[in-house]
Image: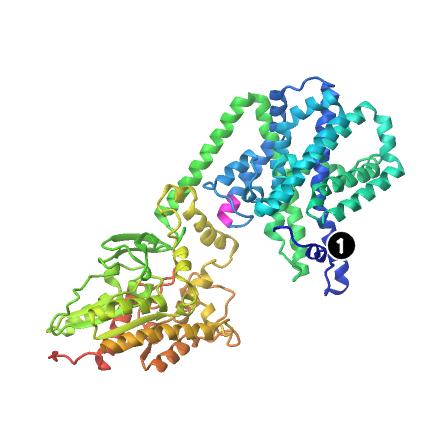
Amino acid sequence: MYWSPLGERIAQLHPFQGNGILDIPLNLTRYVGWMGDQGVQLFIIISGFGLTWGLLARHSEESLPFGSFYRHRAVRIYPLWWISHVFFLPIALFTGRFGQMSLTNSSFYFSLLGIRITPEQLYYFSPAWWYFGLLVQLYLVYPLLWRLLCRFGAWKLLLWGGGIAFLIRGAGLVLIDAYLPSYLDAWSRGAIFITRLPEFLFGMSLAYLMYKRPDQLKHILYAPSTLLLAVIIYAAGIVLSLFLWGMTFAPFMLGLGVFVFLYALFSRTKRTGLGVWVGQHSYALYLTHHSFILALVPVGTSNLVRTGGNIVIALFLTVIIALLFERVETEIMKWYKQVGFRRLILRLGMIFVVGMILIFGSEVLVRQLNPQESNGWGERASLEPNEMFGWRLKPDTVTHLRWKSYDYTVTANSLGFPGPEYSVEKPDGAIRILVTGDAFSSAEGVDTNQAWPRLLENELAAQFLDRPVEVMNFAITGYGPEQYAAVIAAYAPLYNPDLIIIESFVNDYDDVLLSTEEFQQSIGFQQAPQDSLVSYLSLDHLRTFIRSEVIPTLFHTNDPDGYFFSYISILERNQPDLIKRQQAVLEYYKKIQTVATSIGAPVILLMIPASSQVCTPADLAYFPSDVDLSNSNRFDLDLPQRITKEIADTLDWDFYDLRIPLRNSSEGCPYTSYNLHWLPFGHEVVARFVDTLLISNGYLPQLGETSP
């Protein structure tokens, strides 16, 4: 059942508490805000009234020409409607604010037509816009309702039409709640016009009666007994709204009560000032206000000053943009009067085509000059899902990747791992090392032959001239402890290495809690290919470029990826579930230990530091300007290395911290300034360091020695 129990619905009416004297204005604002939904009923009544009153004044009770009526209604509502879409579309696309809009989403085009029927479509982009879909439906059926009104009169239309609508609405509430609860809100709200027809018919009937007998009807509406009845009907509507069956009549009763009360209050008052201005611009204000509220006004009351300030900003922007919309509409209407409908469409079409050429041309230009990581991982084109490990490289492929300052080639062997492939049978006297790890070893941002395992193999081969040297690289971007364990379980017994090297990055303590499904979704396997037409139409690269580079530059804000690229979160002292994550890493490493022991291969653990642990903020273009790593109360710069060494000590593995060789590089910061991995010389530094420690610490035979 979708409809919540009565007790829960009554509990929602309880006032806020705990803010002292501010509880009064907060609760007052809250209760008044709830009346906003009743404004919908009021507007439906006024729409029916206004349409009918205008037609009676012009046509009396003549037959209404369908074509003329639809054309005038379309000209009245659609230009501003389309202007609002054109205005908010690029903002939503390129900033990520104001909700979601996309040229590849069918909801966008249905919304342009005013079709808002399904639950997903009803609140698309701006929830308040659902009403436009109802208005379009009411306009479509209005010529029929007009004929029925002229033929049968106001009372019969209201009683019969309203009665049938109430019956359909009530039956729908009960049946939908029982069999299709996900559609209950849409049905109750007014996704289908029949559910809100009673209010519209009331407005039509009231206009008809007032046109026929104005003095008599005004006398009735002004009578004290009528006002008392309106208050009673309104109160009864509130009570009925607590019950599912009561929602059959509650919206109509609430709208009726409010309308009668406001009519008696304002109809004799001279309409001037703010009220008249709001009425004149109400449609444009309606199209703008909710989007700015959603984008700028935070949910909750944790910071009342900020909330109040943002409300003022939202109201200011609402008014300014609403007036801008109307100005654009005025110019379009001038064109309409000057050149006619067909030439107007031609002009607007040409503007649209030129705009699309500029937008999609910019997308192509960004892809060529400054490709971004979008629509999944930048490496996705080289990867494929895999049942055993979650994902791997596409076997026997060479993939050229360009994104976020990277331009490199990934070469995969038949197993789906980087670099050359070696025979299962070990050559006589060979030195065989199995390496696993993540993007720092696979290697991200540099060609496969520049990865440190490849360079290490060359270093060792130059020293062991009389023995084959094989450094087998089973590292893949994104791998973590779970994948390390799976790789070693699959290939260590098969290839029987003399040594296992695990390259661990600081983010292993985040990766260990993610499921394979979450990783695959993050990679983007379920999305359209990154070079597909859908990707181009989605403006993936242009949107990412504007959000990550243009906006931060213009407004002097941080790169939205900066905190992630710097991996500052793993350096924070107060991390949730850190002990749990450390234990999870240990459990996977214990599995590796079991396999390594069974084949007699020692394991060494290389710890890759985050860029922020090696380079200065000035070296990293993305480093957040508001972060001070010297704040020891917040940050522990040794934390990931310390807890990893504790794990290594538990397993009796040798642990090596790569911060020292990377910091001591004579060429400066080894990390790329615009991404999180190493430049080529960073791989060279690590290869030389590992070569030295393998020889000097006795992991490999001394020069000149051969295996028996």
- How far across and down, in percent of the image, does residue 338 sit? 58, 22
Q: Is residue 241 above or below residue 492?
A: above
163 and 437: which is toward the camera: 163
In this view, the residue farthest toward the right is: 224
Residue at x 30%, y 72% (from the top left corner): 502
Q: Secondary structure at mark 1?
A: helix
Query: Is 214 in the magenta?
Result: no
84 and 338: which is toward the camera: 84
In this view, the residue farthest toward the top is: 62
Question: Which residue is tagged 1?
Answer: 28
Q: Main secondary structure of the magenta part?
A: helix
Question: Can residue 127 be seen by looking at this rendering?
Answer: no
Colour mapping used in the image = rainbow
Bounds of the magenta segment = 90-95
Q: Amino acid at mark 1?
A: Leu
- How far across and down, in percent of the image, does residue 418 sit? 25, 61
Residue at x 49%, y 55% (from the top left corner): 552
Q: Is residue 201 above or below residue 182?
A: above
Label 1 crowding class (10 Å Cα cut-off): few <14, some 14-19, many 20+?
A: few
Question: Can residue 402 be seen by looking at this rendering?
Answer: yes
- How far across and down, in percent of the image, does residue 225 sit? 88, 38
Q: Is residue 326 above or below residue 707?
A: above
Quadrant occupied by the C terminus: bottom left
- How far across and down, in percent of the image, does residue 506 sit? 39, 70
Tell me which corner region of the image, top left, top right, bottom left or bottom right, holds residue 167: top right
